[in-house]
Amino acid sequence: MKIGAQAAVLTALILGLVMFVGGNKTLAVAVDGESQSITTRAATVSDVLEDSSITLGERDEISPALDAPVAEGTLIDIKRHKEVNVSIDGVDRVVHTTGLTVADVVDQLNVSEKAQIEQARAMALASLASTIEISTPKDVSITADGKNKKLNTTAETVGDALKAAKISLDKDDEINAKVADAIVQDMELKVVRVKTKTVTETESIEHGTDTVKDSDALVGTKKTLEEGKDGERTLTYTVTLRDGKESKRELTSDKVTTKAVDAEVSVGTKPKPKPKPEVKAKAPTTSGSVSSTWAALAKCESGGNWSINTGNGYYGGLQFSASSWLGAGGGKYAPLPHQASPSEQVATAEVLRGSGGWGHWPACSSKLGLR
């Protein structure tokens, strides 16, 4: 009986051991890609982590879920949360990720495949010691040399974009941005070619005039004693061209190459003699009250009819107009010439002749040889 009891205990122990061993499972736990094998009797993922002293951060990711059952060969994948410094086109930011490589972060940011990444995409984040530098492609327009180029480039600076477009700048050229400026989307760059050249021109120098007094020549008379000659000067300019068009001209030299020779002119200073007073010839007279000259003129003008009034606007023997008659003072004799006596008409005519000569009777005075 004693032996039988011992055998029963031994059997129970063996069965218990078999059952204990049969409840163990071999699992794989991977943390950020580093895998380890674990033997456990845990029933769920959460139990496995507890048995293995593995804790999860608030933003860590795990698969399968914590309450999922585990079986032989189950893979528990844990991805730790990380904060990664990223600079996109010069703008710094912090990215929260459970990715393992630079490529995972780039994909998470949905960055263009054409973007330029400073670090290798396959680099593990655990090995990352600096900020991930990302340059996205941008549309840039560059106008230079009369042409416009369109670029879609990841160049970081204006200088890099010019290099990509195979556009070089001379030291005097101008651009509407600094070469160190960062490239931004839809940037429009304009290059102005600046050149300088030297231009030489000639200009005439007008000669002057020297005057000398000549006491033997009358006032107002001039005489050229020596002809003058124009001179010439040479002007040198520094001309600035912007895209081939002159924008500035600076005089750098002004040299007289031929001197002007002044003309010499004499000017008379001798006073002019005073004109002799005009001696009016006396008209021949007759024994009558009217001279033969006036009588002949009346004969020519009116047929010698001193009281004629034909209605043509002219009156009397000498054919006055009403305005001439009154202007010469005839109104003191009569309102109209034909109403005055021949001597009164002649007296008034003498006033007219004194102011304008025989020209008041142009046809007849010429016919009679009075002028």
Image: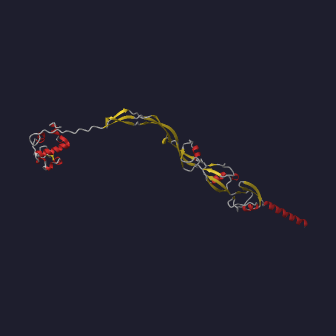
Q: Which quadrant holds the N terminus?
A: bottom right
Compare residues 214 and 44 and report the one nearer the observer.
214
Question: Toward the viewer: 42 or 54?
Answer: 54
Looking at the image, which residue sits at the far bottom? 1
Residue 312 located left or right of residue 267: left
**From this viewpoint, which residue is outermost toward the top?**
226
How far across and down, in percent of the image, does residue 171 sit? 56, 42
- Look at the image and tell me in which quarter the C terminus lies: top left
Residue 232 visible here: yes
Q: Residue furthest left?
A: 287
Nearest the viewer among 276 and 326 is: 276
- Please report the residue visible at 73 percent of the width from the left and 54 percent of the height from the top: 34
Establish if 339 lies above or below 236. below
Q: Is residue 340 left or right of residue 50?
A: left
Q: Position of residue 161 (x, y in %)?
A: 58, 45
Residue placed furthest toward the right: 2
Residue 243 in sight in this render? no
Where residue 221 appears, as percent x and y from the top left, is: 32, 36
Q: Is residue 120 above or below residue 253?
A: below
Decide if residue 235 is on the left or right side of residue 177: left
**Is 134 located above or below residue 62 in the figure?**
above
- Residue drawn 84% across the image and 63% down it: 13
Q: Can you give x and y, in whole percent of width and height, for residue 124 in the image?
A: 69, 51
Marks counted in the figure total 0
Q: Seen in the image, is 202 located left or right of residue 311?
A: right
Q: Is residue 224 above or below residue 132?
A: above
The answer to which of 266 and 193 lies nearer the viewer is: 266
